[in-house]
Amino acid sequence: MPRTVDHGQRRADICDALVRAAARDGLHAVTMRSVAAEAGVSLRLVQYYFENKGGLMHAALLHLEERSHRRWNERLAALPSPAPARARVHAFVAEAIPDDEESRVFHLLWTSFAVLAMTDPALAEQPFVSGPERLERQLADLLTEARADGGLPTDRDPAMEAPRLLALTHGLGTDVLTGRLTSDRALAVAEYHVDRVFDTRSTEGPPHIS
Amino acid sequence: MPRTVDHGQRRADICDALVRAAARDGLHAVTMRSVAAEAGVSLRLVQYYFENKGGLMHAALLHLEERSHRRWNERLAALPSPAPARARVHAFVAEAIPDDEESRVFHLLWTSFAVLAMTDPALAEQPFVSGPERLERQLADLLTEARADGGLPTDRDPAMEAPRLLALTHGLGTDVLTGRLTSDRALAVAEYHVDRVFDTRSTEGPPHIS
DNA sequence: ACCTTCATGATACGCCTGTATCATGAAGGT
DNA sequence: ACCTTCATGATACAGGCGTATCATGAAGGT
């Protein structure tokens, strides 16, 4: 066989190019040609590795989700080894609020895809339900465990707290990206939320840390 | 002067047509021609009333915000006259979760515009900060008042609760629209949240001091 | 040495887009 | 009656889009 190239790598490179282009111009402005230019390859190559635009978009979405999933797990692993539940939850919200460029890009792209998925159910059925659902389960498990350990008041319902936390952080992310909230303020709101979830006594007094 | 037409009305009609078209095909698929067809007028008329596409989009966004604002105030007015704060907050979340077609459309379009605004700060600077900010202030005032009346525990911070509620409902709306949550479940999560905000003692569980 | 297959370039095609132009009813002011 | 202005129609134009086609290096199997 003739010279063979690492297709996976090439596809990943092109997906990254799409992400960069979309972060700059918006996903709506992404074209096969602009992706090719951003990746430094010819239009033909983009066609070659992804048949058509739908395939490219789908692949980029998967690529994005995979990247974010890895990032979140890395952040979790970086925590001191037996990290209390609250610290892990805090790590989650800190990761979810777009403060640095990478998370900003992620949130922008994810929301852009979400909007597309709202009118094109075919696109990304997997990413949009199974992706966040895994995250939700992860969080719910975390909270259930914490509740058993006494780290979380027993009346908190992990099956509600998990989607609540997910929805809240996503909403805050959007507020940040549209310029309505600074990332500092969004983070403060998220932390206020975490405090409320973990503190038994919500009545007055500054939240105690422990 | 020759025959004159109500420009405001025409513009509103065309904006409605845009909203319908976008609700069906997605905002990204909206074109001058598709809007004209949906409104049952010629392409020329859309140009006539809105110079260019940017103007049309901007007007549609304003139109949308105005409609939603009115809808929310109507819902508020429909409440029994001296409605307790909690009931008004509940009305808000019930209005915000997309369950019927109209609120589904609103959420879809609003999010679509939000995504555009993320890479095009010029578009809709007003709608995206001043719009929700008014809502936030409205909510914050409501909560402040409730706290003074004893309807809300004193340690709740309206300046945090308001953006938290806003972000939460928006996030839940997105989850519903992407098919990750049913509207029933989203509403349940939102109500769980409202319960937590208003109840001094977290329900049903043992621990608690007051 | 040759042939097959992979990888890539160049380019063309038809469609749809936003926008511009020209024309023409319709109707009140004079 | 006429003219001006508003409102609308028909159509053209240039550009960008996704996609398809044809050609051609590059390299291992035989």
Image: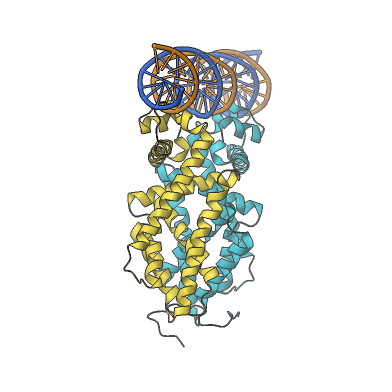
Chain colours: A cyan, B yellow, C blue, D orange
Q: Relative to B112, does residue B176 appear above or below in the rendering?
A: below
Q: What percent of the width, then of the height, locates residue A102? A: 63, 52
| Quarter occupied by residue B182 | bottom left
Q: Nearer the viewer, residue B67 or A23?
A: B67
Q: Nearer the viewer, residue B56 or A137?
A: B56
| Quarter occupied by residue B75 | bottom left
> Does residue A173 appear to the left or right of A155 in the view shown?
right
Q: What percent of the width, then of the height, locates residue D25? A: 68, 20
Q: Could one spot residue A62 in this view of the protein? A: no
Q: Quadrant of the N terminus of chain B?
A: top left
The residue at the far bottom in this view is B209
> Does residue A183 appear to the left or right of A124 in the view shown?
right
Q: Nearer the viewer, residue A109 or B146?
A: B146
Q: Could one spot residue B109 in this view of the protein? A: yes
Q: Relative to B141, does residue A172 appear above or below in the rendering?
A: above
> Does residue A105 appear to the left or right of B202 in the view shown?
right
Give the residue drawn at x 41%, y 85%: B206
Q: Relative to B82, does residue A30 appear above or below in the rendering?
A: above
Q: Nearer the viewer, residue C8 or B123?
A: B123
Q: What percent of the width, then of the height, locates residue B96? A: 41, 58
Give the residue drawn at x 36%, y 71%: B83
Q: Relative to B139, does residue D22 appear above or below in the rendering?
A: above
Give the residue drawn at x 39%, y 32%: B5
Q: How many marks?
A: 0
Q: What percent of the width, then of the height, locates residue B38? A: 37, 33
